[in-house]
Image (cartoon, helix red, strand yellow):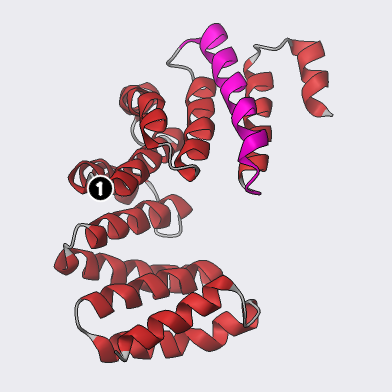
Amino acid sequence: DALPRLEATLGKTHPLTVEALALLSVSFERTGDYVAAEPLASDALARARASSGVNDPSTFFAVLALSNIRIALARFAEAEADLKPAYETSLTTPGEASEISLALARALATIYLGTGKFRDGIAVIERADAVVRQHYPPTSGFRHVIQGTLVALLLSAGRYTEAEPASAALLDTIRQVRGPDNRDALNVAANHAILLTNMGRYAEAEALYNQSYPSLLRLLAPDHQEVLTHRNNLALVHI
């Protein structure tokens, strides 16, 4: 209801209207309705570029919304075509410490993770990690997301000795900030256990899985996919 009112009052290309359209696409994307989300995000990006140019925050946000949809659909080349130039521009305007630039960095690194370009992804996300450490407090969600993406890239690249301390530090921080039973903390713990398994540290991995399992069951049904994955990963430790 708000979008038609904004279009009637401010016009279809006003930054607030464009942002509302992009946000609407995000709401569909987060429910997995990519068919509905993609044309909305594409429309938002076309409007933003027409009215504000390529360097405007509304354009960056629309690029991010559309790219996240295409990443979810594994259409990485299309996502990168829009995302990479937007990210590079955002480093200076509005600046690499801005939330939108960090979000673009994380999305671009996710593309590289999905396409096996681990070196490129690590370079992007290590730069973002240095920025969030300098400008954002340890409680910042941006720090957690950026550091989690770095761990995922290092793990996928087989750089376990670098990934392990970063993963352990992230796990300690997120448990302190959000509590050990928090869903995000449990996800980080599961990823850390996978890393320990890959490193052959089976006893530590098993202890972490067993520690997390009761909390996971309090949050999710026994047949939930995350619970089943947890059981499967624990079984792999024993093979």
Q: Position of residue 62 (x, y in %)?
A: 54, 26
Q: Is residue 181 visible?
A: no
Q: In the image, is residue 35 part of the stretch drawn in magenta?
A: yes
- In the drawing, does residue 51 fall left or right of residue 235? right
- Quadrant in which the N terminus appears: top right
Residue type at numbered disc 1: Gly
- Quadrant in which the C terminus appears: bottom left
Q: Residues within 10 Å of mark 1 (few under 14, many from 20)?
A: some
96 above or below 142? above
For image coordinates 54% across by 7% down, the residue present is: 50
Q: In the image, is residue 235 part of the stretch drawn in magenta?
A: no
Magenta highlight range: 31-53
Pick whichever, 194 or 13, lies toward us: 194
> In terms of image quadrants, where is residue 204?
bottom left
For image coordinates 61% across by 19% down, the residue present is: 43
Would you name the residue on which mark 1 appears? 116
